[in-house]
Structure formats: structure tokens, C-alpha cells
Image: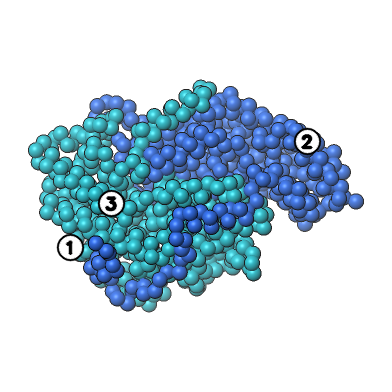
């Protein structure tokens, strides 16, 4: 039977005539899958990408090797095309993965509690701040260090506007590029803030003295929120063990494609006493009527579909597919290789920095320790330098110059070997020579 | 578990086993009302994973990602078309984030007008995220009743609209699957009061190319691309929640917006009254690419046909089951039908668990998952087959519903203790 337009009219007869759209939607149309593919490939080919260019770009999203098994497993239809597991009996696979992910995040951050994901590192940081607000239930001010990512600062401002709260910025970096502990203590003593937010490594790539800052926060009863790079736990004590109250992080580092910045994965973990205030879904262990162990979403009374206006957040769809990828990534690594990769990142970054410090006009911006990202001060124009490097098929870093200083932020991960770094250092040198006179 | 150092083969086997304990649309019927579990075309996954998209770093110079920006710009235009809105932001990480951006726009709009309006109205059947999003913008919510016919009670709305009302959040068709025939009147009531009308786009799959939210009088619209535009649900995300507005609100949109200047595409962060950034970088690009591929694969005719078939399929199921599972409302349903289990006098939750033994995912349970209903609807199914299911599959679903009904009549206790074939028994409440 040929179906014409009139065959469907009876299903829409309740729609008032004046509301009906009489024209055809102006949507481009490609007559076959092949034609769609040809067109989209043309668009993709117009972009440069980090397989073609040697990239030193970081700034919150990082180039790490993504094992092909991650795509192969996470893209299976049972995972990729499933809905949120509201029917736990048919979804134990996904629920087990989320539960394992939560445990992995707890291990990596040294915390006892984790959610099942926030949208990204920036919104997870907002979630962390609001957890502090609910926990402290006081009017004391919220302060954040100006050394968090500028994107994160903007996202905090937007969310704070919603809640009619104001987050104050402080600027206490010393010459090391770290928070000045003496100034911070003095500030805590005088101002008695409710919540303090900082990031490690910070936006200059410098690792903050997390344990000391946690100690100061505890001493002055300041709720501490740390935005963190999870790879640091391959080298240092995790922040939960140091006494930080809440940790947020960007989980993209563990096997998520770059995709021009999204989707990412917001990691959110906290101390035991903060569990009732944790935002987002949580998977827990339960029992069946046959007394078997099983998994399902627990403590849903915090969430929007139960508590509606009283919910801790409005989050519904979150980042489960990304959670699955991260879980596979960490399973493939195991603890030993995780530590190895952290070390390789750090060693590669140190190696490359040493090489380029030999270039006239290039200085290390800060003396403080770094992980895989560092800032360099230039006595020549950063933009011109980047343009020259770009012609040599190199994304040389992020221009973070200000009015007084030409400065680049570079990231070096395990994706480059020593031979490559040597070759690229040579190109850096020759490009700099063309500008530095 | 992190302590173990597993081989690749160990990891593969582990996750293959876990996949066998999971169930996706690719496995079988998934008629979840309000979720729009339509087919996720593999072509779109494949194209989103092209190197030229997957390996683009967000901090690359914009000149080096012109193909991507062109795609996102065109997607903005397509979304404006389908929603009948004037300007689009692609920033929302999910429908709920689009909602949050929408209520923040409402808040800032009235702040700028120096009007103190602290109330948002929502229907009693509103999705929980509507109220939670309003709360995140420091609004309080007042509930507007649904009438016996399933439509919003306009008299109740009139009573509750006052100078303190910033806006009404509504979905149309509603979460009950019913088209709000009074929407033009509702729109007038709100606008005459100087309030704004917000559209929750969760149910747009009923209307593509047939009715546009902008033409219904909505000022702000969000879409769920993981529902209407076929991007995979992923077991609970990531999705994306783009936001559309009428021109008088376009300066409030979250940044960045993709703009075109001459031949060049740029990320525009300089929007005068923008509520700012709601997430890092510029949106769920990996998801949005799939949404765009879907739209251009369908074109206007395909999108309209999809909605027509989605509505036809829901009505087919409704008619086929009306003797045993009557529709809660007499009004014609749209892309989803709300069927009552009152006649059977058996808890929907237990009925749903038995469906698992038949190899299908149950429909949305009223009061369970994401969908909230007034008390009188506690024992019903919201069934959304979508346009992707064949006649054969629709009949299979109908058949299963009838079979389980007979089982309930013969041995209700056995059905109450299901499922039996899932590897675990029913989870204890």
C-alpha cells in the first residue's frame, strides 16, 4: 500500500490548523548514505588534526594514546545503544562497569565516595562547590584561586549566577607559580572563608602543594575543593589522603577522544561525611529476592526524578558511555602501567623543556614543579612563533601571553618518543631563530 | 581491581561478558516512553569518528578547524529551522543543561528589565529536570494541574499566572503523550502577563516538520539530540541539549555561538547579554556531528515522515491493546501512548519485569525512572515505539503484552517474582 500524506492526517487532526507548518523544512538533504559520507568527509578533511600535526596543546584536554580495544568494546551495541539502566535486572553489565568506575575514581583520588559522572571537569567543579555550600550551610564567602582554567572560572560564574551566590577570586601565586602558603594562611586567618577552590596542576601547569593547602584548610575550617589531574596520582599521594574535602577532575585523559573538546567526563569524589551531599547518579550494591548480589542506582532521593525541586542537581542524562571508555582504559593499563605512563609524561615534559630552554629568548616561566604541562616566557612574539611552527606542522602550544609577557603553555605526553622530541626541538630552535634577532 | 594487571585478552573477555549482561536498542525492542529510542544509524557513529573530527584539539587555531565549524554552523541553522526559532546555541551537554541555560536566560532577561519575578510554572506531569533546573536558577515552582482529558488546565493556569510569574515550562505533546490543543491560548496568557514560554523538547519526535515550537508561541526551546535526532543513549549519555530562542533573547544565549563572517566560521564569545559559559570548550561535538548527519540523511521529507510514522505506530499499539490496557486518556495520543493497568489490577512494575523474560525492554513506568506523574496515574505504561520499529515488531510487542496479561490472570504470584532469565532475580525493594 502506498502511503500518502493523507494517510497520516487522522493522527494529527487535534492539532489546530493555524499551527501546522505548511512549508518544507529547509534542511540539506543527501540522497544516499554514500552521498552523506562523501560530504561529511569533505568537511572532516578541511580540519587539521593532531595525527597530522605534532601537538603540544593541553589546557584541560589532553592527547593520550587511546588503545583500539576501547573503541571496539565501548561501541558494542549493548553498551552504546542502551538507555540509562532503570531496569537493573537487564542492565547488570553497565551497572557493574559504573560501580567499578566509581571505585577506580575513589582509588585514584584517595576518597571513599564517587558519583557516576558529571558532564565535564568544569561542571564537576561547580558540583563540588555546591556540595560545599550544602554541607556548610553558611553564608561564609567562597574563594577560588585565579590559577584555575579560565573556562572553569567562567562556568563557575554562570552557575553561581543561578544560585545568587558570588565567588571571589584571589591571586596568591608566588614566583614558583604556586599558591603562596604564607599569604594563603594569612588570608584564611583574616577572612575566614567558607570554601576554597584551587587546581593542581594549575593553569600554568604548576603542581600545587596540595597536602599543605589541605592542612591549612583544615586548620581554619575551610572547605577545600580541588580540581585535579588524575594522572598525578601515579606519582603523588592522592588528594583525599591529604585531607581535601572534594575532588573534581576532567576524565577525558583516560581514553576519551579529543573531539574538539566534547564530550568529556566530570569526575567527582568526596570524603565519607560528604556522601549525602554528592551530586548525580550513584550505583550501589543491593540484594535480589534470591539473596544474590546485584547493582542498581541508589540514594535516588537526591535526584531530580524523586526530589524534583529539592534535588541536589538537575542532572539526568550524564556521561555513561564515557565512563565505560574510562573503565576499559584503566583496566587495560592496570596500576603498574598507569604509574609508568605518569612517569613517561613527566619525563618527556622535563626532557623537552630542557631542550627548548637552550633556545635564546626562551625561559621557564615558573620555578615550581610540573607534571606534563609547563609555561615558557619568550622574548619574542608568541603568536608569530606559533604561526611559524604551524607551517612546520606543529601545534606549538597555547598562547597565554598577557600585556606584559609573551608566554606559551606547552604539554608533552607519552605520545611522543625521544627521537621525535629531538627533531621537534630542532624545528623549535630554527623557528625561534627566524624571529629572535 | 586496579591492582590487577590484566592482559588485553583478559580485558576483552571481561567487557564482552559485561556486554552480555547489558541490553541496548541494538538488541531488541525498547519502547521507553519519553526517551525516543529510535535507531542509532551506524553511519553517523562512523562519521563522527573520522580522524578529521576525532583528533581535533579544542585549543587548535579556529582556522585549522573550519570544516568542523562549518558543520556546527549548519547544524545551528537546521535546528533553528526545525524548532522555528531565530538563534541557536549548541552548548548544552544534555537536555537538562539546555533547560538550565534556558531558565538562566529567563532570570537574566527579567533582571535586565528590573522586574522581580521569582516563580516558574510547570505542569504537574513535568519531567523532574524542569523543576530541578528552575531551582538551580533560584526560582520556585508552582504546579499547574492537568485536566481529566490529559491537557493542561487553562483555568488553573490563569489562576496561577501573576506578576511574579517569570515563565511556564511545558512540553508539547506533554509527557502524557497528548497534544496541548490550547497552546495558542496558553501562549497568549503568558505573554500578556509579560512572562516567557519555555519548551521542553523531549517530545519533539511527534512534530518534526508538522508543527514548530516557535510557531506555537514558545520563546525558548531545548532539544534532546539523543532522543529526537537519533544519537546513541550510551547507557546514560552523553547526549546534547542545544537551545533555541526568539530573536529578542538571542543576546542571552550561552557562548560560544558559531558565526560566519564572509567565508570564515568563528566561535563567537562576544554576545552582549550572554549568560556565559555553561560547560568547558564548545559543546558535545562528538555527539552533535551524529545529530547533523541524521538530519541531512533524512532531509525535510524524512524527518516529517519519521514523526508521522512514530505517531502512527503509537496509535497502532494503543488501538490493538485498548480492550485490556485502555488508554488513560480519550484524546488521540501522539508519538507515545499512556496505557493503564488498572483493569488488570496488577502492579506495572511486576508486569515490566516479566517483559524482560520475553527479551524486550519494558516501557516507561509511570512514577519510575525519569518520568513523574500525578498520583492517580501510578499504574500505567508510557509506550513509545518510535518510527524505527517494523510492523512485525509492533505486533510482537502487542503479542507479549497479551501473553503476560494471560499469565497474570493464571498465576499472578509467578509474574510478581519475575524475571527468571536475567542471570539475577528481581532486585529487592
- Residue at the spot x=25%, y=57% of the render? B314
Evaluate whether label 2 is on the same chain as label 3: no
Of residue B330 and residue B407, the one placed in the foreground of this image is: B407
Chain identity of mark 3: B
**Mark closer to the chain start, 1 or 3:** 1
**A65 shown above or below A165:** above
Task: Classify mark 2: helix, strand or loop.
Answer: helix
The hue used for chain B is cyan
- Residue at the spot x=54%, y=26% of the render? A334
Q: Say which residue label 2 marks.
A: A422
**Residue A11, percent across and down?**
24, 65
- Residue at the spot x=47%, y=61% of the render? A30
Q: Give the spatial CA distance, label 2 vs label 3.
A: 60 Å
Task: Classify mark 3: helix, strand or loop.
Answer: loop
Q: Say which residue label 3 marks.
A: B390
- Mark 3 Cα-neighbour bin, 10 Å: few <14, some 14–19, many ≥20: few
The hue used for chain A is blue
Chain identity of mark 2: A
Mark number displayed over residue A27: none
- Is residue B244 in sight in this rendering? no
Label 1–label 3 contact, CB within 8 A: no
Amino acid at each position: 500500500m502506498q502511503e500518502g500524506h493523507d494517510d497520516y492526517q487522522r493522527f494529527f487532526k487535534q492539532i489546530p490548523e493555524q499551527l501546522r507548518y505548511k512549508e518544507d523544512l529547509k534542511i540539506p538533504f543527501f540522497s544516499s548514505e554514500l552521498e552523506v559520507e562523501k560530504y561529511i568527509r569533505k568537511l572532516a578533511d578541511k580540519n587539521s588534526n593532531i595525527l597530522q600535526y605534532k601537538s603540544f596543546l593541553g589546557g584541560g584536554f589532553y592527547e593520550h594514546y587511546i588503545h583500539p580495544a576501547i573503541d571496539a568494546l565501548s561501541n558494542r551495541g549493548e553498551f552504546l545503544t542502551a538507555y540509562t539502566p532503570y531496569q537493573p535486572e537487564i542492565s547488570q553489565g553497565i551497572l557493574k562497569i559504573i560501580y567499578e568506575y566509581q571505585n577506580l575514581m575513589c582509588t585514584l583520588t584517595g576518597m571513599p565516595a564517587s558519583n557516576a559522572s558529571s558532564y565535564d571537569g568544569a561542571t564537576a567543579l561547580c558540583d563540588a562547590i555546591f556540595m560545599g555550600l550544602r554541607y556548610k550551610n553558611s553564608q561564609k564567602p567562597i574563594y577560588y584561586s585565579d590559577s584555575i582554567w579560565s573556562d572553569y572560572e567562567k562556568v563557575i560564574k554562570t552557575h553561581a549566577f543561578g544560585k545568587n551566590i558570588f565567588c571571589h577570586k584571589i591571586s596568591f601565586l608566588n614566583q614558583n607559580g604556586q599558591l603562596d602558603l604564607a599569604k594563603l594562611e594569612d588570608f584564611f586567618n583574616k577572612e575566614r572563608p567558607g570554601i576554597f577552590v584551587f587546581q593542581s596542576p594549575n593553569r600554568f601547569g604548576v603542581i600545587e602543594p596540595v597536602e599543605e593547602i589541605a592542612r591549612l584548610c583544615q586548620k581554619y575550617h575551610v572547605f577545600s575543593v580541588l580540581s585535579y589531574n588524575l594522572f598525578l596520582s601515579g606519582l603523588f599521594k592522592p588528594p583525599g589522603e591529604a585531607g581535601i574535602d572534594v575532588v573534581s577532575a576532567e576524565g577525558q585523559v583516560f581514553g576519551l577522544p579529543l573531539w574538539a573538546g566534547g564530550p568529556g567526563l566530570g569526575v567527582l569524589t568526596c570524603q565519607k561525611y560528604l556522601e549525602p551531599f554528592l551530586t548525580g547518579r550513584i550505583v550501589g550494591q543491593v540484594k535480589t529476592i534470591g539473596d544474590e548480589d546485584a547493582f542498581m542506582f541508589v540514594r535516588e532521593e537526591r535526584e531530580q526524578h524523586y526530589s524534583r525541586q529539592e534535588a541536589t542537581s538537575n542532572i539526568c542524562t550524564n556521561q555513561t558511555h564515557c565512563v565505560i571508555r574510562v573503565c576499559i582504559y584503566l583496566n587495560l593499563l592496570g596500576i603498574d602501567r598507569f604509574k609508568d605512563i605518569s612517569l613517561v609524561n613527566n619525563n618527556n615534559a622535563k626532557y623537552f623543556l630542557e631542550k627548548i630552554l637552550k633556545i635564546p629568548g626562551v625561559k621557564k616561566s615558573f620555578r615550581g614543579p610540573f607534571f606534563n604541562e609547563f609555561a615558557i616566557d619568550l622574548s619574542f612574539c608568541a603568536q608569530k612563533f606559533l604561526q611559524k611552527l604551524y607551517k612546520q606542522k606543529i601545534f606549538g602550544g597555547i598562547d597565554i601571553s598577557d600585556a606584559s609577557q609573551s608566554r606559551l603553555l606547552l604539554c608533552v605526553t607519552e605520545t611522543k618518543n625521544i627521537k621525535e622530541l629531538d627533531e621537534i626541538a630542532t624545528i623549535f630552535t630554527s623557528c625561534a631563530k627566524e624571529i629572535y634577532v | 581491581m586496579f591492582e590487577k594487571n590484566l592482559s588485553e585478552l583478559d580485558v576483552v573477555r571481561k567487557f564482552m561478558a559485561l556486554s552480555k549482561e547489558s541490553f541496548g536498542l541494538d538488541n531488541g525492542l525498547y519502547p521507553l516512553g519519553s526517551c525516543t529510542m529510535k535507531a542509532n544509524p551506524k553511519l553517523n557513529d562512523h562519521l563522527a569518528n573520522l580522524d578529521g573530527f576525532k583528533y581535533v584539539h579544542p585549543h587548535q587555531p579556529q582556522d585549522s578547524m573550519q570544516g568542523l565549524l562549518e558543520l556546527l554552523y549548519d547544524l545551528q541553522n537546521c535546528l533553528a529551522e526545525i524548532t522555528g526559532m531565530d538563534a541557536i546555541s549548541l552548548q548544552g551537554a544534555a537536555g537538562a543543561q539546555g533547560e538550565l541555560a534556558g531558565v538562566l536566560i529567563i532570570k537574566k532577561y527579567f533582571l535586565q528589565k528590573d522586574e522581580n519575578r521569582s516563580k516558574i510554572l510547570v505542569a504537574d506531569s513535568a519531567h523532574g529536570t524542569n523543576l530541578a533546573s528552575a531551582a538551580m536558577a533560584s526560582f520556585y515552582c508552582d504546579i499547574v494541574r492537568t485536566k481529566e482529558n490529559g491537557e493542561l488546565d487553562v483555568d488553573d493556569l490563569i489562576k496561577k499566572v501573576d506578576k511574579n510569574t517569570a515563565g511556564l515550562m511545558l512540553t508539547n505533546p506533554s509527557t502524557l503523550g497528548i497534544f496541548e490543543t490550547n497552546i495558542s491560548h496558553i501562549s497568549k496568557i503568558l505573554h500578556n502577563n509579560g512572562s516567557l514560554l519555555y519548551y521542553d523538547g523531549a517530545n519533539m519526535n511527534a512534530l518534526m516538520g508538522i508543527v514548530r515550537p516557535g510557531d506555537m508561541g514558545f520563546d525558548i526551546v531545548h532539544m534532546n539530540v539523543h532522543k529526537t535526532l537519533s544519537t546513541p543513549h550510551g547507557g546514560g549519555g552523553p547526549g546534547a541539549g542545544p537551545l533555541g530562542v526568539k530573536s529578542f533573547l538571542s543576546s542571552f544565549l550561552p557562548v560560544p555561538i558559531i558565526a560566519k563572517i564572509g567565508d570564515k566560521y568563528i566561535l563567537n564569545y562576544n554576545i552582549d547579554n550572554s549568560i556565559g559559559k555553561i560547560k568547558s570548550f564548545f559543546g558535545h561535538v562528538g555527539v552533535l556531528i551524529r545529530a547533523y548527519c541524521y538530519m541531512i540523511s533524512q532531509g525535510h521529507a524524512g524527518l516529517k515522515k519519521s514523526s508521522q510514522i512514530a505517531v502512527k505506530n503509537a496509535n497502532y499499539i494503543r488501538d490493538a491493546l485498548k480492550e485490556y490496557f485502555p488508554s488513560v486518556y480519550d484524546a488521540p495520543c501522539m508519538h507515545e501512548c499512556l496505557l493503564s493497568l488498572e483493569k488488570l489490577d496488577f502492579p506495572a512494575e511486576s508486569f515490566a519485569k516479566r517483559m524482560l523474560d520475553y527479551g524486550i525492554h519494558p516501557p516507561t513506568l509511570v512514577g519510575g525512572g525519569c518520568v513523574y506523574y500525578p498520583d492517580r496515574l501510578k499504574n500505567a505504561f508510557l509506550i513509545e515505539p518510535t518510527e524505527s520499529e517494523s510492523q512485525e515488531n509492533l505486533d510482537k510487542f502487542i503479542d507479549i503484552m497479551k501473553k503476560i496479561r494471560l499469565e497474570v490472570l493464571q498465576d499472578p504470584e509467578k509474574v510478581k517474582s519475575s524475571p527468571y532469565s536475567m542471570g539475577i532475580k528481581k532486585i529487592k525493594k
